[in-house]
Amino acid sequence: MKAVGVNTYGGPEVLEIVDLPEEQAGPGEVRLRVFAAAVNPTDTLARNGSRVETQKIDPPPYVPGMDAAGIVDQVGPEVTTGIGVGDAAMAMVVPRGAHGAYRESIVLKASSVVPSPKGFTHVQACSLPMNGLTATLSLDLLNLTDGQVLAVTGGAGAYGGYMIELGKHAGLTVISDASDADRALVEELGADIVVPRGDDFAQKVREHFPNGVDGLADGAVLNELAIDAVSDGGAFTSVRGFSASDIRNINFTTTFVTTLDGDFAKLDTLREHTENGIVTLRIAGTYPAENASEAHATLEAGGTRGRCVITF
Ligand SMILES: NC(=O)c1ccc[n+]([C@@H]2O[C@H](COP(=O)([O-])OP(=O)(O)OC[C@H]3O[C@@H](n4cnc5c(N)ncnc54)[C@H](OP(=O)(O)O)[C@@H]3O)[C@@H](O)[C@H]2O)c1
């Protein structure tokens, strides 16, 4: 069975085709014939060794990838989610060793595998689970109510785009950053106010909201630079572990999507939102498994809008 993995850490070129034994779905499990796996920033960290302490790779290869879509080809006993053989489905994968999304067949707990949005391709569907769930979790952590103001950094990115769309759906006013080239895109995603991106994001936000915003989702990882955008007693959620304390009663939280691993209901809600046009799936390009390194190099070069997707 074909997968894309690494036997040694390094640049995009270390990604290679690896042969893995096929697995069978056990009780409570579903097997997905993967046709598409999205490439996310976290995959590049897994590949270059930045996560080496947490990965415990013994023995290699390590297979990255947190997003898969394809066709269910085995359903184990005791599966009660209603998914069946032949269904188009998508899943968030929490990689461990050779268990990552860059493989043509993967066995997952049934609660992780949700029908793909109807009318969308496998390539489109695989771009949704991980970043959609991350934005869902961030919104939960920010705990904002209808009419409050949400600021988003990195609004043109995958996570930032979902934050804008889900924020608008939740009845929030959304202010986001964008480069000149991305302004139209970020407006189209639904941002009410778009400010130029840069280290002075907080200052730009205060020009529109002198008391600061109620909540901030920091997709661009501005960290300290973004804090001043938040009002006294507001909420700040980070996506790369940044936190702070004792600053104007701001509630700092860290968004870690793995806490939503296996949350069927939340992923299924994202499916519904996609079918209803609330959430947009954006694809930058597709790469056959043999060219996976090209997909990583493209992502790392910056400026991709939409996901690069590896196809099997
Ligand atoms: N903790 C979790 O569970 C979790 C889950 C998902 C994602 N994440 C993290 O969330 C972040 C966003 O992920 P993503 O998939 O949305 O990435 P992405 O698609 O690359 O989006 C990031 C966006 O931020 C922009 N950006 C980068 N540096 C900036 C800066 N200094 N000022 C303003 N904008 C800047 C990027 O523009 P350019 O392309 O022009 O650089 C891009 O538009 C990543 O760090 C990722 O690792 C964490």
Image (spheres, rainbow, N blue to C red):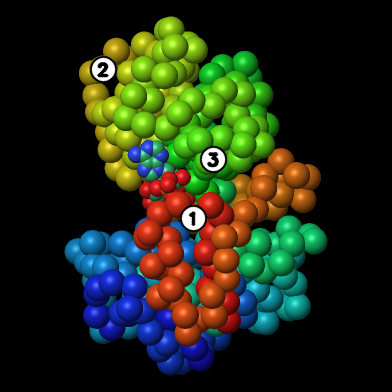
* Residue at figure coordinates x 23%, y 18% from the top left: 246
Circle 1 is placed at which residue position? 304
Q: Is ligand 1 less than 8 Å from the beta carbon at label 1?
A: yes
* Residue at figure coordinates x 28%, y 72% from the top left: 11
Tell me the number on the disc at residue 182: 3
Circle 2 packing at 10 Å, graded few (<14), some (14-19), many (20+), is few
Circle 3 packing at 10 Å, graded few (<14), some (14-19), many (20+), is some
Q: CA distance from mark 1 to mark 3?
A: 11 Å
User: What residue type is disc 2 on?
Assistant: Ile
Residue in the foreground of this view, choosing between 46 and 229: 229
* Residue at figure coordinates x 49%, y 12% from the top left: 208
In the picture, measured across the screen, residue 233 lies left or right of residue 242, that is right
User: What residue type is disc 1 on?
Assistant: Thr
Mark sitting earlier along the chain (1/2): 2
Looking at the rendered structure, the secondary structure element under dot 3 is: helix
Q: Is ligand 1 less than 8 Å from the beta carbon at label 3?
A: yes
Q: Are marks 1 and 2 in contact (CB under 8 Å)?
A: no
Q: CA distance from mark 1 to mark 2?
A: 34 Å
Q: Using the rendered view, name the quadrant where residue 219 is placed.
A: top left
Residue in the foreground of this view, choosing between 257 and 165: 165
Tell me the number on the disc at residue 247: 2
